[in-house]
Structures are given as structure tokens and as C-alpha cells.
Image (cartoon, coloured by chain):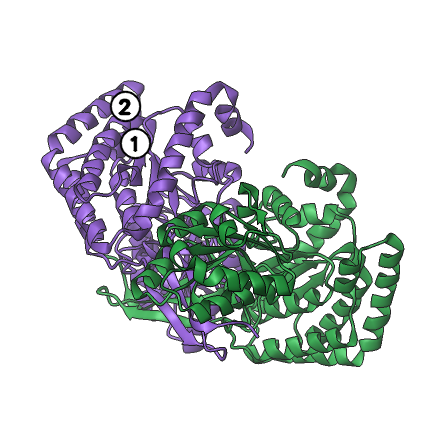
Chain colours: A purple, B green
Amino acid sequence: MTGNTAALASGAHSDIDHYMNQLGRQARAASRMTARASTAQKNAALRAMADAIAARRDEIADANAVDLAAGHEKGLDAAMLDRLALTSARIDGMIEGLLQVAALEDPVGAITDLRFRPSGIQVGKMRVPLGVVGIIYESRPNVTCEAASLCLKSGNAVILRGGSEALHSNQAIARCIRAGLQAAAITEHAVQVVATTDRAAVGRLIAMPEYVDVIVPRGGKSLIERISADARVPVIKHLDGNCHVYIDDRADIDKALRIAINAKTHRYGTCNTMETLLVAEGIAAAVLPALGRAYAQAGVELRGCERTRALLPDILHATELDWATEYLAPILAIKVVNDMEEAMDHIARFSSAHTEAIVTEDYTRAQRFLREVDSSSVMVNASTRFADGFEYGLGAEIGISTDKLHARGPVGLEGLTSQKYIVLGDGQIRE
Amino acid sequence: MTGNTAALASGAHSDIDHYMNQLGRQARAASRMTARASTAQKNAALRAMADAIAARRDEIADANAVDLAAGHEKGLDAAMLDRLALTSARIDGMIEGLLQVAALEDPVGAITDLRFRPSGIQVGKMRVPLGVVGIIYESRPNVTCEAASLCLKSGNAVILRGGSEALHSNQAIARCIRAGLQAAAITEHAVQVVATTDRAAVGRLIAMPEYVDVIVPRGGKSLIERISADARVPVIKHLDGNCHVYIDDRADIDKALRIAINAKTHRYGTCNTMETLLVAEGIAAAVLPALGRAYAQAGVELRGCERTRALLPDILHATELDWATEYLAPILAIKVVNDMEEAMDHIARFSSAHTEAIVTEDYTRAQRFLREVDSSSVMVNASTRFADGFEYGLGAEIGISTDKLHARGPVGLEGLTSQKYIVLGDGQIRE
């Protein structure tokens, strides 16, 4: 632990340390029970949570109003206030989300690859929970519900630490979660929501490997970098999404236009939005003018290399910084490349390894791109916007990992589990 | 980075930093090539390495003699000198190991779970290398060969840092590895053996996430704890093996005796050796006297709880410390427990989560033990000694992970890879 977090977690905050240790101990004990809870019991808890939220929606709305008023007073910006707001539709969304997670297949206990070995033992793998998950997130209070449901369904205990601006909302949701756990006779320590806004709580949460097995930070890049630097336990982290679409000179032009427009303009603020478009020289004249018109119509600012500007003379000049930037805004960098090799080199150099797509009808190039591009999602002839837990059929996601170990890409229930080996014998010994 | 490693890696050692950065840059560049090397090319390299070792066995033996002489002079103990020695049989073992890894299935590029989604895209997972692996190990020079072969076959580049006492042996083996890579037209930077004995090299190797994706330390617990504490990249670590066998009161007595004797006496120094035997009260009188005689005959010192000593009055009294100790020696702690619940509680409290086994004929208890014991290997009616990459059919292992994320238990080729998502579309966009 270094810097601020260390200072915050040290001596002066022994009350917080004490409190967090207590949550940790309780979570560790609860994790043994959640690990062996039956699927029916976990689903009953999730449905009871949904019922509790439906029954107490006024209480949740009132708590949220307190947070919103305080947020206004503190001068939170409009985007932050929007994320903080629990509208009626969002409360419906939480209820629906809980029921959806209840409907997902339970990953825990699944046995795969069980095979006889020459010694006569059978060896296989059994999917098991990770143990205790710590989740640190910012203003959106509905994450409390989403994260709790995914962790519980995957057999984990969880400690949730939401943003201070959502404290009352999160505590109101936590009461519904506890009611649901109680209804299914699962210990309320299975889901604990940190009740202090003291930032020392975060410092302690990420530095107690004896109680917490993995941390999932959800929020801006600076939050995640800080947590990764200071954590004493593994972090499933999602840094940024500098995503690329490469239009190959053997692309179908209709598909190329459709995908390049959708990948940028479908939503600007998401991590799977295209930030740089790479276009093969041989097809640039056939696609860039039409794309330039479409982006202009959508209000997207373009920044291009020299060869791009030869075709789209009115746009800005792209700098090295543009290739490295995740705009999260209606801005797009465009580069004309000689061929797929140059495109893959550019991606290897500038991509954040989130999601890259090629548009091509060439079989061998598609295969090479799939194999050689080292990102968490690699696509052929599809919009980068598909990189998402729901679209991939995971049901829901706790985050999108840009790491290489453990989980890569959207992290759903399976990403919150691990596999242990099981051995079934009949008295075998090593000779 | 903290403590010694930080001090060693700092200012005074800028030459070492420079050297390690160069190895890192070269490894990163090489990893792009190893990731796309064909199976045939990787296998050709492995076979050419085997040929080179066979052709240069005198050179290797001579280099090893230099290390052994220096080791004698430094006063290394007999066990360390034994591990350091490259006998003719061990050189044969390296050759055979290379050919075995060449014969293993290539995990890279394997696509699983490719399914159509309602949007029309197909989503699946492709197995990919981790990138650059750093391996830090102690005296056994044959690890150089084992680790290099597993990393190369799994498409990774690797930086190997062996013990200073094996420097000449490791460099001789490294020359054979380079010859093999060259013969298969794979860059020699795919496998780099650190050529300095300066400990600052380790400090730098574990702290350059820009070049190294994962560290695998192989050695004593103190080495691994030090590396885990200071590493700035994920560590696949194997701490200790405090393994348990629980003899249930519904055990078959023959199987119980056979397994309890084998799990302790087959080898004393291995991490999958039983260190504590738990015996259900209802069967203790039926098994402990016979086990006491068998262990006495094998020269195993016993330390028991009160109830054990009621049946085996001549043995020492076990303390709390015994329950927590990995003896790695002919010593065994024995505890009589009321039932499986108490056995599982004991395991949850004292086990290092490596390997635990139950001996029982009871179906429901076997299922519960498999599911509820949270160790990397959980066994029914088999000796803990089976927890091993070869026995599990992984071909070979780079280590045994006691971590929960990524890889658990024996880590073979698959543990040196990850999975990315692939999406195959036909022009699909998000609506």
C-alpha cells in the first residue's frame, strides 16, 4: 500500500480498520455458507430481494431523494446526478435484474473434464466460488443490487462499497437485500454494504487478503489505477476501451459502412465504442467520403492522418495523442494504413486490449486477425458495441476485464468462480 | 516494491535495470511471434533443443561440474548439491521432457463454446498465450529446460532466472535452447536466461508490467512470499502443502490404511504429502493401532491429540503448531474428530488449500466433502500424492497453484494461457 490510501488506512483510522475487519471476518465466515447454499436457496433469496424492493420502492425513492438533494447542494454535475437518480424505471430495472440473475444457470458445482487416468483415478474440475469479493463503485446505486445478485448467485460473499454521494440510496437497497437473504435463511453477512463514507474504508478493504479474495473496482480510470496500485489482493480491472475497427480492402462496403457508423455513433460514452478507425489504402476512397458524410450528420468530430485528410480535407489533423485516446465522446480518429499488417501493428501499439474488429470478406485475413490480435474481444464483421455481457449471453456482467489472467472480457457469473480439481478414487495409491 | 528488492533494484543498479529492460523489451517483441508460431514450428524447436542437449551433453556436464565445485567450496549442503547435479540420467530426463512437451496437444487457438446469439453474431472463446512469463527458481538447473519448453509450447516468451549456484549449468542449457529455437526459425528472444547473478535482476523482473505478464516463482516459501509481496505483476504462486486425509467412520478399512500410509510415506519432501491425519472417532480404534505400527516401521514420528494418544500411548502430544505445520519430513500429526463436520472445520482452519482427501464409502459424505472443502485438489478414496501434473494428465507442470484466481492446482500448458472472446458476424450492428 502506498500514498493516500496507506495514510488513510493507518493509525488515525483505527475505528475504520476495526469496522472493516469485522465486515471481513463476517464475510469470510458467510462465504463458507454461500459456497454450499443450494441453487434453490440462492434463487429464493434473489426473488425475495426483488419482492422487498417492489414493496419498499417508496422508501428507496425517499432515500434517493436525500442523496440527490445533497448532490445538488454539493454541485455534482448533471451526468453524475443522472447516474445517481433512481427513477421508477431504474427501480423496475433492479427488480427485473434480480429475477434475471435468479433465472441464470448456477455455475457452482459444475464438473467438467472428468476422465479416467492410467492409475485408475478419475480427475476432473469442479467450479467453485472465489470466496469473498470486494466491489468498489461510484455513483450508480443500482450497482449495489446488480453486484450483490451476481456475487450471491456465484456462491460468493460480497462487501460492497458504493460512492459516498449514494450512501442513503445504497443503505435502503441494502435493507431490501438483507430482507431477501433472511427470507431464504442465508446469513445477512453474505452481502454487506459498507455504511461509512470514510475513504479509509477503501484502503482497508483492498488490503486484507485474509478476508477478501478479489477486488472488482467499477469506475473511472483513475479510481481503478489507484486501487490496482495499492491493492494487496488480486484486482479484476477494467481500465479503458481504446477500441479499433479495421476496414480491410477486401471488406464488403455495405457492412463496412454499417459497422463503422454503429461502432462509433450507437453510444459515445461506453467502453466498447470505437475510438480509432483504420482503413486499408485500397478501399479508403470507396468508404471514407460516405463515412465522412455520415459522421458529420451524426455530429462526430473527425481527426485524420494525412492520407485520410487527402480524402476528407475539412477534418482536423490527428496527432500521436489521438491514437492513444479513449474519447468517450463524439470524436473519432481515422488512419489510412497500407494493409492488415500495419493495422495490427497500430493496434498492438495503441489499443487498450479491450475490443477490436476487422471488416473483411477474406477468409485467411479474418482467421489471422482473430488469432493474432491480443485483445479481450476480437471480432470479424460485427460492431465493437457487441462486447457486452448481455450480448455474449453471460446474462449480466460485473465488469469487463482488460487483464490477461483469470477473466478476460465481460465478467459474468463464471468469472466470479474458479475451478478446483477433484479426484475420485477407489483406494488408489501412488506406486 | 518494498524492502530489499526495492533497494537492490534502485539507483545503484542502473546497469542491471538497463539489462533487464532490454530482456523485457526483447521478450515482449518475441511474444508476438511465439503467439502466432504454428504447432509444427514450436514442436520442431522443442525437438531441436532435445537434439542439441544430446549433442552437447559433455559441455553441459562440464559446466555443471564448475557449478558443483563452486558449490562444494561455498559449503552448500548435500540436498542442495544433489538438486544442483546434472547426472547423465537427469540430462536424459531433460531430453525426454522436451520430447514429451512436443507430443502434448497445443492449447493455443482452441475455440470453445462458439454459439449463435439472438443478434445473429456467434460468440466463442479462443485460448491464447499470456504473453511474457517470468520464472524465478532455485538450484535445479533442469527447471530451465522444463520451464522453457512449457512456456514455448503455450505460445509465450519467457525470461528465466535460475539460482546463482547453477549459473554455468543454466547458461549451457540456454545455449542448447537457443540452438533449438534457431533451427526452427523462432527468435532466440523467445527464451532468455538471465546471465547475471545480481539479485537486483529479480527485483526488476517482478516489477516491469510493461514487459512481463505473470511471474511464476519456484522455490521455498520465503522466496515466494518475498516475490509475492514485491511483485507489480500477477504471481502464480505455490506456497505450501499442509495436506489432510480424513478417515471417515464409514471408510473401507483396507483403503483407509493403504491411503493413509501411502499419502505419508511415499515421499516425505513433496508438497502433496499428508501432514495431518484426521480420524473419525467411530473408526479410530479400528485403524489407529495398525497405522501406528506401519508408521513406526517406516520411521515416521507421530504427534497426536489426547484421543489419539489414548490408542497410541507412546506418541508425542500434538500442539496447535503441529496442526499448522508442513513438516516435509517423516513426522505426522494425528487428530481424532467426532465426525466429518469437525474434520472439515479443522481443514478450513489449518489447511493451506493444497490437497485434502476423504476415505469413505458413504455417497452423500463424499459428495459434500468434494463440494465443501475449498482446496485446489479434493479427493475421495485416493492418496494425496496424486496431486501432480503428470498424474492429472497435464503432461507436465510449471508449478502447483494454491491461489484461487486464474489457475488452481497443478499448472500445465493450459494454466499458461488465457481465453479471449471472439465474435463472428456477418455485418451485425447493435440496434
| Left or right for B291, reference B12 | left
Residue drawn at (66%, 79%), measured in percent from left and top?
B96
The answer, for residue A154, to whether it is visible in the render is no
Percent across and percent down for residue B329 are: 65, 56
Find residue A395 and report its image quarter: bottom left
- The quadrant the N terminus of chain A occupies is top right
The answer, for residue B265, to whether it is visible in the render is yes
Q: Which mark is residue A80?
A: 1
In depth, the one of B227 and A97 nearer the eye is B227
Q: Earlier in the sequence, mark 2 or mark 1?
A: 2
Find residue B47 and report its image quarter: bottom right
Q: Residue under mark 2: which chain is it in?
A: A
Q: Local crowd at mark 1 within 10 Å, few (<14), some, or many (≥20)?
A: some
Q: Secondary structure at mark 2?
A: helix
The three-letter amino acid code for the residue at tag 1 is Met
Find residue A182 and report its image quarter: top left
Residue drawn at (55%, 73%), measured in percent from left and top?
B395
Q: Secondary structure at mark 1?
A: helix
Percent across and percent down for residue A218 are: 37, 41
In depth, the one of B52 and B115 nearer the eye is B52
Name the residue beneath numbered marker 2.
A71
Percent across and percent down for residue B55 are: 79, 81
